Image (cartoon, grey):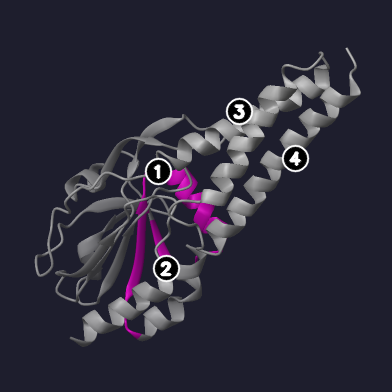
Amino acid sequence: MQRWQALAPRFAKLGVALVAISPDTPAEVARMAAAGDLPAIRLLSDESLAVAAAYNRVHEGALTDYPRRPLRRSLMVPTTLLLDAAGRVRWSEQSDDYRLRLDAERVLAAVTRALAA
Amino acid sequence: MFHLPTLLLGLLAFALVRANRVVHRRLVRALRVPRRPVAQLVAMALTAALAIATLTRPFDLVGYTLAALALFGAGRFLFVAFRSRLPAKRLIVTEGQPAPDFTAIDADGRPFQLSSLAGQPVLLKFYRGHW
C-alpha cells in the first residue's frame, strides 16, 4: 500500500481516486488511517465481506500466516479494478498468489493506457 | 539439563529461521518475492532437518526449545510457500460493465457509497487487510 501512496500524486494527476477495501474491522481501518501513512487512499472496512461477495472476491478459509490471528479465515482475493467516470470497469487484474504483490508502477501504466484509450 | 553442542545447534537452527524471515520480509517490501523461492525453500528444509537432528541430541532445555521453535518456523514457511495459490474466481463484472455500487464503512466510521465518486475514475483495490 505504501507504494500506492508513493504514486498517489501521479494517480491524482490522472484524476483517479484511490479506494482500498479489506476485511479489516472499522477499528482496524481507523487505526491504519490514523497512522497517517496512507493519506491519499480511502480505506474502507468490509468486515462482513458483503462487498467482496457482491464482486465474487471472497477467498474462503484463506491461510493467514500472521501471529495472533486465526490460521484460517475468509479474506479477499487481491484484485484491482479501474472504473471510469461512468462507473464502468475499464481494466482489472487479480493476483493468483497472495505472496506476489501487484506492482503499483505497472498499474499506473495500465491505468494511463486505459484512460487514454 | 545443559549440553553445549545441543544448545549451539538449537541456536543455529533458530538463527537460520530468523534470518530467513528477515530476508523474506525484505523481498516482500521490494516486490521481489519469486513465484517459487527455491533458495529459501532449500534453506528452510535444511534448517528443519537441523532442528530435528538437534532434538535427537542429548537434552538441553534451551537448545531443545530453540530447535522446536525453529522447526515450527521452518515448517510454517514451507507449508505457506506451497499453499499461497489463490482461487481463480471469475470477477462478477467484465470490462465495459458497470461496477456494482456498494456501501462500506470508511476510516471515520461513516458509511461510504462507491457511487458518491461518480464522475471521476476510481482505482478500487480489494486487499487482504493486515490480517
Q: Element under label 4?
A: helix
Q: Label 1, on which residue?
A: B84
Circle 3 crowding by C-alpha within 10 Å: few under 14, some 14–19, many from 20: some
Circle 2 crowding by C-alpha within 10 Å: few under 14, some 14–19, many from 20: few
Task: Please say whether residue B127 is one of the residues in the magenta stretch.
Answer: no
Does residue A68 show up? Answer: no
In the image, what residue type sits under mark 3? Phe
Q: Which mark is residue B15?
A: 4
Q: Compute the Cα span from label 1 to label 2.
A: 18 Å
Does residue B10 show up? Answer: yes
**Same-chain check, marks 2 and 3:** no
Q: Label 3, on which residue?
A: B72
Upstream in the sequence, badge 3 or badge 4? 4
Task: Please say whether residue A41 is one of the residues in the magenta stretch.
Answer: yes
* Range drawn in magenta: A14-43
Q: Element under label 2?
A: loop
Q: Residue A33, how many percent across, how many down?
A: 50, 57
Q: Compute the Cα span from label 2 to label 3.
A: 31 Å
Mark in front: 1 vs 2: 1
Q: Residue B11, how many percent across, how many down?
A: 80, 33
